Image: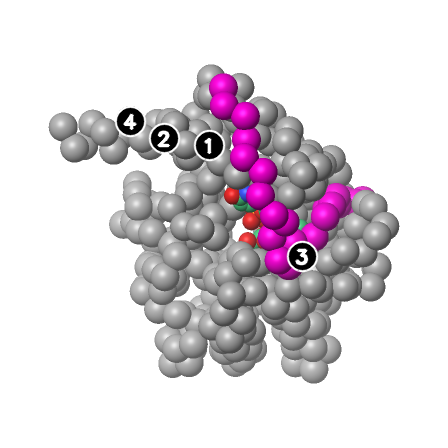
Amino acid sequence: MARYLITGIAGFIGSTLAHTLVEQGHDVRGIDNLSTGSLDNLAGIRDKIDFQQMGLQDVAGMKSACEGIDFILHQAALASVPRSVKDPLTSHQSNIDGTLNLLLAARDAKVRRIVYAASSSAYGDQPMQPKQEDMSPLPLSPYAVQKLACEYYIQAFYRTYGLEGICLRYFNIFGPRQAADSPYSGVIAKFTTMMMAGETPTIFGDGLTSRDFNFVDNAVSANLLACLAPSSVATGRVFNIGTGRSHTLNEVYATIAEQLGFTAAPFYGPTRAGDIRHSLADIHRASKELGYHPKAHFHEGLQKTVAWYLAEKEKKAASTL
Ligand code: UD1
């Protein structure tokens, strides 16, 4: 039984990882500053994990959080490209300074390995598709720069201090528990909850922008595989965690609308600053070296996601009766 530290445990991906690890009987410690995460996401496992409310900037807190830990699954971040465009300094402090604090504490506590939630945004508008890990990164937004900088930090910590690390470049992860209540929410969470409320979402651009939307269960399996991978791949190497298929925003809109019986056509607005046009993962490296095979497909993932938001809405309605 391994001991895990999940940063950002009350967030969307962190909490999904926590539920899985607890089910598997592992020891889970988690930290979160609750700035964007919610304790609701830990319902059912709150008493089975060691949760501490703290941010990555808390140097003494990081030290104690890393003590006795085998694997860190580092999910905490101030996510969102547009948030970083609006306020680059705050997301820099959280994403880069916070990660450096964590790495220093992990090094000193002799943690076995850190698995890092990197981002496909690092590729920027690299014209070649699909994106391969050895392409030169071309980050467009402050968020992309921050996520990429932390990959380099992880590589430097392996080379200089021997701390094992694996960087998982997530490609637009979606699924249950993804926050939907912020202007910075992911597009699937936002479209689903808006349509459920009878509001018509806006597609930024012409609707032909595409993403490799990846269901959260696939990201969870990638993290677990990254912990099990041999030390020879934990040298700060980077892996694409997508599906190898992409879908346009028009397609996303139409699929969610169909599932909800929502009939209004979308509004179209200007393209968002910092957005990239197309994003599609080549997942051969992750498949060969980590044994990563995304089992959950887009449509099935979307069905589960829409069903979850509907069930949550019912739960909330029942609790206010
Ligand atoms: C980016 C990263 C992703 C990262 C995420 C963190 C890329 C390719 N992906 O996702 O790896 O995890 O940031 O936040 O850079 N959109 C609309 N209407 C809306 C909201 C969004 O049309 O109301 C559009 C956006 O303009 C974008 C697409 O939907 O074209 C996806 O947006 P979003 O879900 O925010 O994710 P990315 O910014 O692509």
Establish if 82 lies above or below 107: above
The residue at which mark 3 appears reads as 121
What element does badge 2 sit on?
Answer: loop
Identify the residue at image location x=34%, y=52%: 38
Local crowd at mark 1 within 10 Å, few (<14), some, or many (≥20)?
A: some
**x and y percentages locating residue 135 in the rendered image:** 84, 59
The residue at which mark 4 appears reads as 314
Q: How many marks?
A: 4
Decide which of tag 2 and tag 3 comes sooner along the chain.
3
Q: Is residue 109 visible?
A: no
Mark 2 vs mark 4, foreground winner is 2
Question: Mark 4 is on which residue type?
Answer: Glu
The residue at which mark 2 appears reads as 197
Establish if 178 lies above or below 143: above
Identify the residue at image location x=81%, y=56%: 126
Question: Mark 2 is on which residue type?
Answer: Ala
* 3D distance between C-alphas at marks 2 and 3: 30 Å
Q: Is residue 124 left or right of residue 130?
A: left
Q: Is mark 2 within 8 Å of ligand 1?
A: no
Question: Mark 3 is on which residue type?
Answer: Ser
Question: Mark 1 is on which residue type?
Answer: Thr
Pick the front one: 83 or 91: 83
Establish if 174 lies above or below 9: above
* 3D distance between C-alphas at marks 2 and 4: 13 Å
**x and y percentages locating residue 30 in the rendered image:** 40, 59
The residue at which mark 1 appears reads as 200
What element does badge 4 sit on?
Answer: helix
The residue segment tinted magenta is 263-284
